[in-house]
């Protein structure tokens, strides 16, 4: 299906830039998960509530998006076949992807068309519904084990920013102690004392992400796409980083299956920008196959 590419519309740099750095990495999943209050006070942001969602917009800019970038020169599409080949080929593919220019003046374009988006949504609904049905015994078992392993709720909820700056509550299994700060730095090691015994295991093999299938069914997330970040991080985004917000965030993606998964996504934007520029059903399928294979091997989405 040949569809014309659409220019990515970067949101203007009109957000406040506080002096103190905020949380450097999304993914913390501590806390009770019972509170649904938005965690931040953003004096220069307007939160427009509709059906339980909030829209992240600039207060001194009526238009959320600026004018389109210039057109790109022709570039071969990435269908992700290199992800399914041998380790050497994948290594060369990661090196090539990592070498892509990250300068702010680089032009990226949003791949796809309405028909492609409709197919992607249909696949999201069908696969997430089927997985929820097939994995329901495992989901119930993990929820019970989380409750037995440490005091607190089985599920963890945290505000994240999705497509076009819309905030939503992301669901996960709780893998940290209930008294750990809800929006603190995400653990980077199994030795982190905030992690529970069971939490170390389910994070290692990415089973803590299973409840996000609910977010996919609700249309807040997609199976394959950029990881959603916390509002405190998004409010400091540059124009380049805000290009991640032109598509729905995903449970898995290029960064999640890459060797750079151990490092913060905001230090590895080229993975998400490459995916947004090249997204297509074949690439999505390759990423999903790599993710499933990694989880089955018990090594997480790497």
Image (tube, rainbow, N blue to C red):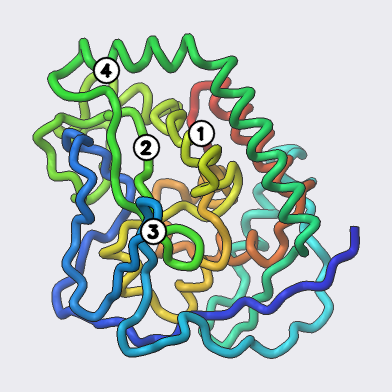
- Can I make out residue 271 in this image? no
Q: Quadrant of the N terminus?
A: bottom right
Cβ–Cβ under 8 Å for marks 2 and 3: no
Dot 3 falls on a residue whose secondary structure is strand
Residue 247 image offset from top left, x and y in percent: 57, 61
Dot 2 falls on a residue whose secondary structure is strand
Q: Which residue is at 45% across, 58% downward? A: 162
Q: Which residue is at 34% across, 61% downward? A: 49
Q: Residue furthest left?
A: 179
Q: CA distance from mark 1 to mark 2?
A: 9 Å
- 3 or 4: tag closer to the N-terminus: 3
Badge 3 density bin: few <14, some 14–19, many ≥20, Cα 10 Å:
few
Q: Which residue is at 54% across, 46% downward? A: 219
Q: Nearer the viewer, mark 1 or mark 4?
A: 1
Q: Which residue is mark 2?
A: 171
Badge 4 density bin: few <14, some 14–19, many ≥20, Cα 10 Å:
many
Q: Which residue is mark 4?
A: 146
- Can I make out residue 243 in this image? yes
On screen, residue 9 versus residue 160, left or right, reads right
Q: Nearer the viewer, mark 2 or mark 3?
A: 3
- In the displayed structure, 151 sits above or below 257; it is above
- In the displayed structure, 6 sits above or below 263; it is below
Q: Which residue is mark 3?
A: 50
Q: Residue 123 is drawn in which quadrant? A: top right
Dot 4 falls on a residue whose secondary structure is helix
Q: Nearer the viewer, residue 34 or 280?
A: 34
Q: Residue furthest front?
A: 51
Q: CA distance from mark 3 to mark 1?
A: 22 Å
* Residue 213 image label: 1
Q: CA distance from mark 4 to mark 2?
A: 14 Å
């Amino acid at each position: 299906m040949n569809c014309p590419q659409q220019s990515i519309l970067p949101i203007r740099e009109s957000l406040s830039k506080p002096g103190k750095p905020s949380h450097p990495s999304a993914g913390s999943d501590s806390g009770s998960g019972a509170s649904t209050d938005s965690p931040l006070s953003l004096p220069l942001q307007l939160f427009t509530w509709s059906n339980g969602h909030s829209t992240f917009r600039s207060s001194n800019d009526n238009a959320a998006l600026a004018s389109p970038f210039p057109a790109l020169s022709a570039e071969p599409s990435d269908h992700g076949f290199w992800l399914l080949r041998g380790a050497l080929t994948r290594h060369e593919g990661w090196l090539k992807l990592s070498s892509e220019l990250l300068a702010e003046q680089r032009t990226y374009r949003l791949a796809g068309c309405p028909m492609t988006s409709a197919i992607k949504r249909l696949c999201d609904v069908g696969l997430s519904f089927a997985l929820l049905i097939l994995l329901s015994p495992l989901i119930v078992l993990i929820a019970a084990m989380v409750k037995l392993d440490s005091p607190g709720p089985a599920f963890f909820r945290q505000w994240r920013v999705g497509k076009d700056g819309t905030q939503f509550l992301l669901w996960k299994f709780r893998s940290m102690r209930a008294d750990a700060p809800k929006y603190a730095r995400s653990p980077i090691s199994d030795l982190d004392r905030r992690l529970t015994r069971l939490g170390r295991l389910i994070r290692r093999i990415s089973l803590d992400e299973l409840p996000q299938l609910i977010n996919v069914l609700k249309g807040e997330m997609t199976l394959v796409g950029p990881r959603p970040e916390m509002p405190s991080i998004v409010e400091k985004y540059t124009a380049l980083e805000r290009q991640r917000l032109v598509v729905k965030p995903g449970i898995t993606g290029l960064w999640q299956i890459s060797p750079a998964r151990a490092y913060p996504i905001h230090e590895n934007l080229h993975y998400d920008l490459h995916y947004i520029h090249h997204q297509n059903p074949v690439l999505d399928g390759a990423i999903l196959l790599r993710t499933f294979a990694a989880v089955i091997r018990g090594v997480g989405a790497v």
